[in-house]
Structure formats: C-alpha cells, structure tokens
Image: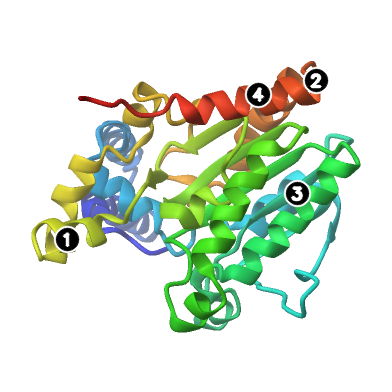
C-alpha cells in the first residue's frame, strides 16, 4: 500500500515489529512481550496521528490512489445494480457512472464520479473529471428518478470538472449550471456523499441534495488548494497554507452549515478497510432516506432550496 509522508513513522514501527517476529521465529526466542509493546505503541501513535491531522494531510488521504471508488461502494453496498448509459445525444462520459440499484431492498438511483486505480483505468475515467456530457447524463438519470419517485444517492470524488478545451467547447459551465437549477427542483429525496475530493462546481453539479455528508478524511471546497495558492500567492507550493485557510474539512464545514454530517472512516482512512467504510456509508444513507421519506415532494424541494439559500453571510 502507498505510504504517505506523514505515515512513515508508523511504517518504521511496523518494520521493527516484523523484524522481531522474524527473529523470534528463526531463533525460537520468546519476544512476545516486546512485540506487544511495539504493537501497542503503533496503535497509540496511529490514533493520535489520525485524530489530529492537518487539512493538508487529510488532502493526501482524500487523494490516496487506493481509496475506494464509486464502483467499489456500489459492489459492496448495492444489490441488482443496472448501469444506465449515455446522455441521449451520442456520448457516454465514463467519469460519471449511474444506474438503478437496491440498498437493503430499497430502489435508488445511484450516481457518482468515478476514478481509476491504474493508469489504464484513470484514462478510461478521465481521472474522475467529468465533461459536460457526464453532467447531462447524470441529469437524465435524476429526471428519470423524479418521474418514477425513486430516491437519488450521489457519491462524489472529483478534483473538479474537466478543464480542457473540448469541455469548454461543449459548454461545461452551462451543463453544471443546469444541473444546479434542475436538482433544486427535484421532488424526491436526494442524499449526496463526498467520499474523497469534492472540488468546485465539478462536485456541486451532483451535490444539490437534501442531505450532504463528508467522509472523515475527504474535503469539499470551491477551489483546489493548489489553485487557490496559485491565485493568492502565485505559488502552488503554498497549497498547505491554502488548505488551512479554505476550511475544507468536515469540522469546519459542519460549523458553517455546508454539510449535514461527517462519516467516520476506519483508522488510517477508507482504503484500509473497504467493507467497514461501506457499512458506515450505508448506515448514513439508509437513515437519511428513512428520515426524508416522510416528506412530500414539495417539502423536499422547499427544504433543499432553503438549505442552499441560507449558506454564507453578507456584510454591507
């Protein structure tokens, strides 16, 4: 597994444990007490480390190459997933995937951004950066769900919408703007989860929801820390300072009313235990849908609209 810079002390302790186990096995010496001491030290260090991460360190975990992606969660959480392809104008953007599925027997329209774990997969999914066709496909699925009264679940992990010339030529900004407007009008429950990176309008284009949740080590921001640093200081290397200033992690976003809750991750991050992470995610989605199912279509629409209208503050 890829080891992040700040995790190297944990790796060093683990190497000592492995070395002691090897010596014990080869020599027959009883080193169980020493091994247990080192294992306890490693566990204590991990708990302290991950409970006090800086925003820049959470940023690294959110971008971890082995972090679960959309299809990992679908495979572990859903039954009878049927992918629905295309935007009905000849394109099928693989950076956004969606379809009908069941979660504990409840039919949902589940849609999300998709990242790969290898170079080949990342090329297929465009590194999780959707083009306008992807947002139009997502909107088609949302409208289908709205027509047949099916709850919507979105799982978002994107560094942002694709910034290339082809995306601009096919109206990237317009596609996202239409999604924001039309998602605000939906009369079915919408639950959104930021599972890794939630960057800019590329994330918001799938996140106009009644309930928005953030995984413990995920982030949600109007601009990437590197982009912010490049604008403010003309120096992308100051991304760590920008990450601190932007208030991109769950505790700050909860305080500002941007998200509705934080979903705890396994110790070390979601990539350490896919099943445990999926169980926590599933519990949150089910409880949210149970809560929202008692509201009428007009109530869902009104509460969603009011939720986003009250964000932010104005000074005159």
Q: Is residue 128 visible?
A: no
User: Which residue is painted at 61% across and 28% down in the image?
Assistant: 304
Quadrant containing the N terminus is bottom left
Name the residue carrying label 2: 296
From the viewer's perspective, tell me whether residue 64 is left or right of residue 140: left
Q: Is residue 313 visible?
A: yes
Query: What distance separates the C-alpha of mark 4 from that of mark 2?
Result: 10 Å
Label 4 SS: helix
Q: Residues within 10 Å of mark 4 (few under 14, many from 20)?
A: some
- Res. 302 mark: 4
Query: What distance separates the C-alpha of mark 1 from that of mark 4?
Result: 36 Å
Residue 227 image position (x, y, % from top left):
25, 61
Could you say which quadrant of the image residue 252 lies in? top left
Label 1 SS: helix
User: Which residue is painted at 64% across and 67% down in the image?
Assistant: 134
Name the residue carrying label 1: 231
From the viewer's perspective, tell me whether residue 135 is left or right of residue 157: right
The reply to whether dot 3 and dot 1 touch (C-beta < 8 Å) is no
In front of the other: 200 or 283: 200
Please tell me which of labels 4 and 2 falls first in the chain. 2
The reply to whether dot 2 and dot 3 touch (C-beta < 8 Å) is no
Residue 268 image position (x, y, % from top left):
40, 44
Query: What distance separates the C-alpha of mark 3 from that of mark 4?
Result: 17 Å
Query: What distance separates the C-alpha of mark 2 from that of mark 3?
Result: 17 Å
């Amino acid at each position: 597994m890829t080891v992040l810079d700040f995790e190297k002390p944990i790796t060093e302790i683990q190497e000592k444990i492995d070395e002691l186990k090897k010596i014990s096995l080869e020599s027959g010496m009883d080193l169980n007490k020493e091994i247990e001491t080192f294992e306890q030290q490693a566990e204590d260090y991990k708990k302290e480390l991950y409970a006090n991460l800086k925003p820049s360190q959470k940023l690294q975990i959110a971008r971890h190459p082995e972090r679960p992606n959309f299809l990992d969660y679908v495979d572990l959480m859903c039954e009878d997933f049927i992918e629905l392809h295309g935007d009905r104008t000849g394109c099928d953007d693989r950076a956004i995937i969606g379809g009908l599925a069941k979660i504990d027997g409840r039919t949902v329209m589940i849609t999300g951004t998709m990242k790969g774990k290898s170079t080949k997969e990342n090329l297929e999914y465009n590194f999780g950066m959707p083009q306008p066709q992807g947002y139009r496909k997502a909107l088609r699925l949302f409208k289908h769900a709205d027509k047949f009264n099916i709850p919507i679940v979105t799982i978002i992990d994107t560094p942002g919408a694709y910034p290339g010339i082809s995306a601009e030529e096919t109206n990237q900004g317009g596609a996202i703007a239409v999604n924001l407007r039309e998602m605000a009008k939906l009369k079915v429950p919408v639950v959104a989860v930021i599972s890794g990176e939630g960057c800019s309008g590329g994330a918001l284009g799938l996140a106009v929801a009644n309930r928005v949740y953030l995984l413990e080590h995920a982030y949600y921001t109007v601009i990437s820390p590197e982009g912010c640093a490049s604008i403010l200081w003309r120096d992308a290397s100051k991304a760590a300072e920008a990450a601190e200033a932007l208030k991109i992690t769950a505790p700050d976003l909860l305080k500002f009313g941007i998200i509705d809750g934080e979903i705890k991750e396994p110790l070390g991050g979601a990539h350490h235990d896919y099943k445990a992470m999926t169980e926590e995610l599933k519990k949150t989605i089910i409880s949210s849908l149970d809560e929202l199912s008692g509201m009428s279509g007009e109530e869902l629409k009104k509460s969603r609209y009011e939720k986003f209208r009250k964000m932010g503050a104005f000074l005159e």
